[in-house]
């Protein structure tokens, strides 16, 4: 049974350090929103697969096991995220790969914290660790600590984030102002190469899909990632303009790739303007095509 004709194949649970809702609550939210199919794609973590057992039937929402693997694209050193669908939740080699990535993320977090301290922000390491529940802290926990720490409340650098133009969407705004390339707390990201992330997903029985492809800085580089072995592209995304959606859909058709649709929903803290299922063109036919591709790839 499915309740709706829309889908969202890029959702984060509380197993992502910057996600807010437990897995079952996400199923409840999807049902209430009339979403017919979801995939929970946590950052470098597949614990959601275990938690989701029995929930699709209970809530009447189709479910595709998923993950979002953080990689580094060697051409320019940028982060590129690869969604993996139909991952085997008990694949030990894949789990080991995710642990390697998480260890590298911890190194990046430590360097970000040091960089922020060097420009005058106060941060409490214990509180960051508590917010990230012992996992590698993402930028979200680090930024939340910036805003929660009383020693930062009168910092003029934060005025617009407490009461000005950046208050409503302050975490994404702070990230762009401090963590992106060329900004004061920028740290070169460390992870496994994009090719290796794609290969790991394939080895675990998954379908690798390039997430939010607008993050690839040069469209000519899409061909390089295509040749690494992706089988799909997240052409329908909250990050994309209408023109970008059309371009990536045409790219997928031209290159024999499946098309997926995802919001990158995290919750109110991390991405308050992103709603579950809040994307145009997220029709159920896309998940049917993905399921068909998976069946074919298993033969």
Image (cartoon, rainbow, N blue to C red):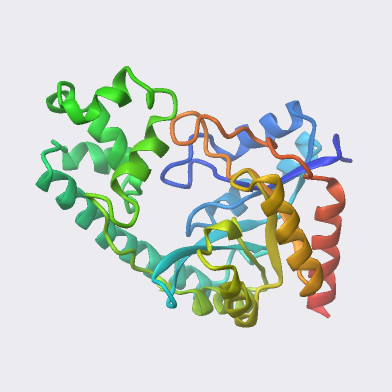
Q: Quadrant of residue 31?
A: top right
Q: Residue furthest top?
A: 163
Q: Is residue 218 above or below residue 142?
A: below
Name the side, left or right, on which 16 lies relative to 142. Answer: right
Residue 170: % across, % down: 38, 30
Q: In this view of the protein, which residue sits in the foreground, 134 or 120?
A: 120
Q: Is residue 167 above or below residue 185?
A: above
Q: In this view of the protein, which residue sits in the foreground, 280 or 287?
A: 280
Position of the N terminus by quadrant: top right
Q: In this view of the protein, which residue sits in the foreground, 38 or 187?
A: 187
Q: Quadrant of residue 157?
A: top left
Residue 147: % across, % down: 26, 29
Residue 21: % across, % down: 53, 34
Q: Residue at x 57, y 50 (%)?
A: 48
Q: Residue at x 10, y 47 (%)?
A: 118
Name the side, left or right, on which 212 lies relative to 149. Answer: right
Q: Residue at x 53, y 52 (%)?
A: 42
Q: Residue at x 81, y 68 (%)?
A: 253
Q: Is residue 246 visible?
A: yes
Q: Is residue 132 visible?
A: no
Q: In this view of the protein, which residue sits in the foreground, 194 or 132?
A: 194
Q: Is residue 18 above or below residue 103?
A: above
């Amino acid at each position: 049974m499915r309740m709706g004709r829309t889908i969202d194949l890029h959702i984060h649970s509380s197993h992502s350090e910057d996600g807010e809702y437990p897995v079952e609550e996400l199923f409840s939210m999807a049902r209430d929103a009339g979403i017919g199919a979801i995939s929970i794609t946590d950052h470098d973590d597949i614990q959601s697969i275990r938690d989701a057992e029995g929930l699709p039937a209970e809530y009447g929402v189709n479910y595709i096991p998923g993950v979002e693997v953080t990689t580094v694209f060697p051409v320019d050193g940028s982060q590129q995220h690869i969604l993996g669908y139909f991952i085997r939740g008990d694949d030990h080699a894949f789990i080991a790969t995710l642990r390697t990535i998480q260890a590298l993320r911890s190194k990046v977090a430590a360097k970000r914290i040091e960089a922020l301290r060097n420009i005058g922000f106060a941060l409490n390491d214990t509180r960051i660790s508590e917010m990230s529940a012992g996992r590698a802290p993402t930028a979200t926990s680090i930024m939340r600590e910036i805003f929660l720490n009383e020693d930062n409340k009168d910092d003029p650098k934060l005025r617009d984030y407490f009461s000005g133009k950046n208050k409503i969407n302050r975490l994404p705004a702070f990230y762009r102002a401090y963590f992106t390339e060329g900004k004061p707390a920028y740290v070169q990201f460390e992870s496994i190469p994009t090719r290796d992330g794609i290969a790991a997903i394939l080895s675990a029985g998954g379908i690798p899909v390039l997430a939010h492809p607008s993050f690839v800085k040069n469209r000519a580089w899409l061909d390089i990632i295509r040749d690494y072995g992706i089988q799909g592209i997240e052409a329908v995304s909250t990050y994309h303009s209408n023109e970008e959606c059309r371009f990536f859909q045409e790219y997928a058709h031209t290159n024999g790739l499946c098309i997926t649709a995802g919001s990158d929903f995290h919750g109110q803290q991390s991405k308050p303007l992103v709603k579950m299922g809040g994307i145009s063109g997220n029709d159920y036919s896309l998940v049917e095509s993905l399921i068909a591709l998976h069946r074919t790839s298993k033969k």
